[in-house]
Amino acid sequence: MSDWRIPLSDLDFGAEEEAAVLRVLRSKWLSMGPEVQAFEQEFAEFLGVKHAIAVANGTAALHLSYLALGLGPGDEIIQPAINFVAAANMTVAVGARPVFADIVSLDEPTIDPADIERLTTPRTKAIVVMHYGGYVCRMAEIGAICQRHGLALIEDACHAVGARYLDQQQRPPHGKMAGNLGDIACFSFFSNKNLAVGEGGMVVTNRDDLAERLRLLRSHGMTTLTWDRHRGHAASYDVKLNGYNYRLDELRAALGRVELAKLLHANRRRRQRVAQYQAELKAAHGIQVVFPGREADSACHLEVILARDNQMRDGIRQGLTAKRIQTSLHYPAIPDFSAFVSKNLQAGDTLPKSREFAVRAVTLPLYASMGDKQVAEVCQAIQSIVQ
């Protein structure tokens, strides 16, 4: 156990989760089987999509998405510079080139449609959007760009399970949930996510052709699974594609089903905490909130604030650490990581808003079981540091 009095994230597990795990243990079937199938069906119904394919983690979801879309050497994939590195790493893994786009603004750190348009070339084959912190990108504008240029639209929805796209002009895909806004979408169920099972992920799509490829690629390209053969539904199998072992196990699927049933309530709790943060930090000297007043349509995965400058940001983090309040950074700009600089993939002197955001942003504690007294304590601590 950590020594943090207020951790960055926390799990709200109890008797229901224990019962789900015990149910799997008593079944004596641990690899992909009926719990995974049920989780996939329930997740698809929750989002309103045709297909949900459970996978080992969010990175596997991204990798399989690129492969299913046929992305590879010579292709360019435009994606946000402010994101977890997995989307960029998987771009390199399939032999494509990541092209990094800037954010809309410091208080709306999602990919900028205007920068997507500027960066699109004949080599561009796909756009990755990331719904930062659980706040959905400008999908009507981005979708229109993809239609004009014939580009695949991939949602990195790892922050956004349960978020909904509400367009002020009610343009399509207004009213749909994150994950149902493009050709294919990826979710992560890592321990700090709104729906957390430790590891695990999901790929979702409404396209039958992509779903078929995803299911094959997930499990070595095989036409049947061990569970099918165990039940006597198949005696053998063919291998149609050169695939991977990106399967999800029964224990995590069982946990996922419980967490999915609790998700809407948990996200409401997160929205309440975000609204409290924004109200209490509104007058804090030198502090700017991110996505002001946008929590109603968000999954509220992260609570991020901007300090006046990098020195102030570091001072806030050090001051909160001294009070045993955990913070984090979401995220350094991907093009500035050594692995991307060394490959000459960085965007040079562009991305001014992303780079400024990266040195000023600090992530505060946020989780469904967090109480209003804990939020108040964090805010009071920040105010005492910056006054």
Image: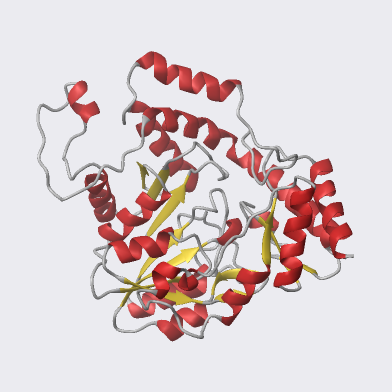
Residue 137, position in %: x, y?
55, 66
Which quarter of the picture shows residue 96? bottom left
Image quarter of the C terminus: bottom right
- Vertical placement of residue 106 versus 186, above or below: below
From the viewer's perspective, is 56 left or right of 14?
A: left
205 or 346: nearer the eye?
A: 346
> Colour scheme used in the picture?
secondary structure
Number of marks in the image? 0
Q: Is residue 308 above or below residue 56?
A: below
Q: Is residue 204 visible?
A: no
Question: Which of the image's four quarters has the N terminus?
Answer: top right
Image quadrant where residue 33 sits: top left
Residue beneath the point at 47% across and 17% down:
22
Let me know if residue 218 appears in the view: yes
Q: Residue at x 72, y 64 (%)?
A: 314
Decide if residue 183 is on the left or right side of residue 156: left
Relative to 349, say whether 58 is above or below. above
The residue most toward the top is 26
Foreground pick, 260 / 188: 188
* Image location of residue 101, percent across then percent down: 48, 76
Foreground of the two, 383 or 136: 383
Q: Nearer the viewer, residue 64 or 309?
A: 309
Residue at the image point whose x is 64% and y is 70% from the top: 359
Horizontal placement of 362 versus 232: left or right? right
Whole-percent x, y for residue 375 in the image = 79, 47
Residue 5 in the image, given as x and y percentages of width and height: 75, 39
Compared to residue 260, the image places residue 83 above or below, namely below
Residue drawn at point x = 51 percent, y = 68 percent: 139
